[in-house]
């Protein structure tokens, strides 16, 4: 049970961070194609910093997708369903 609660707390924290990015439009600029290729290669080799950098610089795309889904679908359905990545 504590594992489920901590996972839900982490999910809420990450969702709150994403919502603040969406509301403020405070996104880092997208990477150039060369930089993206370089960091994808580094991430494939297990570099966590490269992975985080790619995620941060693609938040604009994530926010765009979230905004579209938020208005089109009943998000409560997804929030109430059991996420696939949580092992019970």
Image: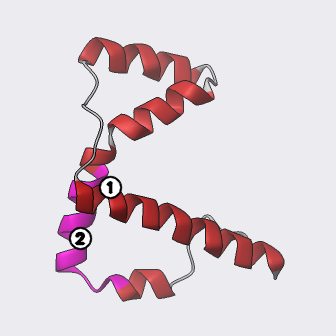
Residue 88: in sight, yes or no? no
User: Between marks 2 and 1, how big is the CA–CA gap?
Assistant: 16 Å
Residue 66, percent from left and from top: 28, 64
The mark that comes first in sequence, 2 or 1, is 1
The residue indicated by pointer 1 is 21
- Examine the image and state in which quarter residue 71 appears: bottom left
Residue 72: say if magenta: yes
- At 40% from the left and 39% from the top, the residue drawn is 56
* Left-right relation of 39 to 31: right
Quadrant assignment for the N terminus: bottom right
- At 28% from the left and 43% from the top, the residue drawn is 27
Quadrant assignment for the C terminus: bottom right
User: Is the residue 47 above or below the residue 74 in the image?
Assistant: above
- At 42% from the left and 80% from the top, the residue drawn is 78
Q: Are marks 2 and 1 in contact (CB under 8 Å)?
A: no
Range of magenta residues: 62-75
Residue 57, percent from left and from top: 34, 35
Name the secondary structure under disc 2. helix
């Amino acid at each position: 049970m504590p594992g489920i609660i901590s996972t839900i707390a982490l999910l809420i924290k990450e969702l709150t961070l994403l919502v603040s990015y969406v509301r403020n439009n405070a996104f880092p600029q997208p990477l150039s194609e060369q930089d993206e290729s370089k960091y994808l290669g580094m991430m494939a080799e297990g570099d966590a910093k490269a992975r985080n950098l790619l995620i941060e610089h693609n938040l604009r795309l994530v926010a765009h997708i979230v905004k579209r889904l938020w208005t089109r679908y009943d998000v409560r359905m997804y929030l109430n369903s059991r996420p696939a990545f949580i092992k019970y």
